[in-house]
Amino acid sequence: MARKQSDYLADLLAEEGEGAIPANERPAPEARSRGTTLLGRESALARVASGEVRQVTQLLLDPARVKIWPGNARHYDLLSEDQCRELIDSIIAEGGQKVPAVVRRIEGDPDHDFEVIAGTRRHWSISWLRANSYPDMAFVAQVAQLDDEAAFRLADLENRARADVSDLERARNYLSALRTHYGNHQTRMAERLKLSKGWLSKMLKVGALPDAVIAAFASPHEVQLKSGYALAQAMQDEAEAHAITGMAKEIACEQAERREHGKPAIPAANVVRRLLGARKMMMGEDGGAEPYRYANGHGRDVLSIQAINRHGVTVRLHADATDTEGYVDALRHMLAHLEATGQGLKR
């Protein structure tokens, strides 16, 4: 008797796409060595969607009748034509979508018949094409019968092969799944996903970073595992967390102002440096503080604080870094920084 598809999927993912396949159907060793490539991932997804014994018929769907499963890591609203341009061009060149998405049927929703488990970018690209000169383009999908935990592992399997899924998106997806599917048991989750417990722990900490800190970056996609984990570790100290949050709000205001005036965003490396140095900045001169710096869009210092003490603030304006208006902006942001970190001149 054939096993349920969800059982097959659990075995398939537990062995990274190989362990549940009968011995006489497994590929040769040289073929297995390619299993971690994108093609291998897609092949594994196709086996999941088709089931162990039967081939599931591919469906040609109207993407408007298909919604995105909320358990996926990718933020659908953040996708854009630029991000999907290569895929869009490929679909046009090949006369349609060649690699099917994986969906599951839903009930009780008058507006949708299916939800996407794997294939969010394909859904977005087909939707875009239908709205832009290709009204008959169909969304190609295979239907799988999966519970939420199995669907999460399937989506995670695909996302591991996607460089455009950011560390923060995956981290927050893992944090949500930890609560929803694994009862907050990290060890169990790591075992089910075949991940290092240490690596998963770091991802979960990054996923817990507050929105106020993430807002300091020009885009959430700039939050990487290494720097994000350093921030998460620093914020375990209450005083550090207070300083980092205050600095993040200040940087977020600067980023918004730069966007409004068409200026380059503050680079992620500069954001991380300022956030991690926020506590030292609050400590002032006697605390060995790293000087506050305001940089232009190219990372060149415009203004830096040389010292803070009870008599006032010593500021250095760097020559040839900007025009008069730029220096005025830098001074205004410096004053906002001092207020945000409890070092305002009116104390």
Image (cartoon, helix red, strand yellow):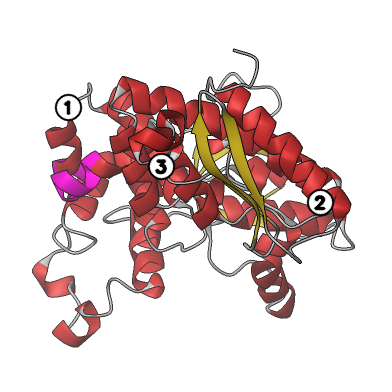
Counting residues from the start of the chain, the first of labels 3 and 2 encountered is 3
Query: From the viewer's perspective, is 321 left or right of 292?
Result: right
Spatial CA distance of label 3 from label 2 is 25 Å
In the rendered image, is residue 69 in sight?
no
Figure quadrant of the N terminus: top left
Range covered by the magenta-colored residues: 191-201
Counting residues from the start of the chain, the first of labels 1 and 3 encountered is 1
Figure quadrant of the C terminus: top right
In the rendered image, is residue 340 in sight?
yes
Magenta stretch encompasses residue 107: no
Q: What kind of residue is marked 1? A: His
Q: Nearer the viewer, residue 93 or 138?
A: 93
What predominant SS class does the magenta segment belong to?
helix
Q: Nearer the viewer, residue 184 or 50?
A: 184
- Mark 2 lies on a secondary structure that is helix
- Mark 3 lies on a secondary structure that is helix
Q: Which residue is mark 2?
A: 326
Q: Which residue is mark 1?
A: 185
Residue drawn at 40 percent across, 71 percent down? 38
Counting residues from the start of the chain, the first of labels 2 and 1 encountered is 1
Q: Quadrant of residue 318?
A: bottom right
Q: Is residue 19 above or below residue 261?
A: below
Q: Which residue is mark 3?
A: 276
Q: Is residue 296 above or below residue 347?
A: below
Residue 25, percent from left and from top:
18, 72
Q: Nearer the viewer, residue 50 or 152?
A: 152
Residue 236, percent from left and from top:
28, 27
Q: Quadrant of residue 138?
A: bottom right
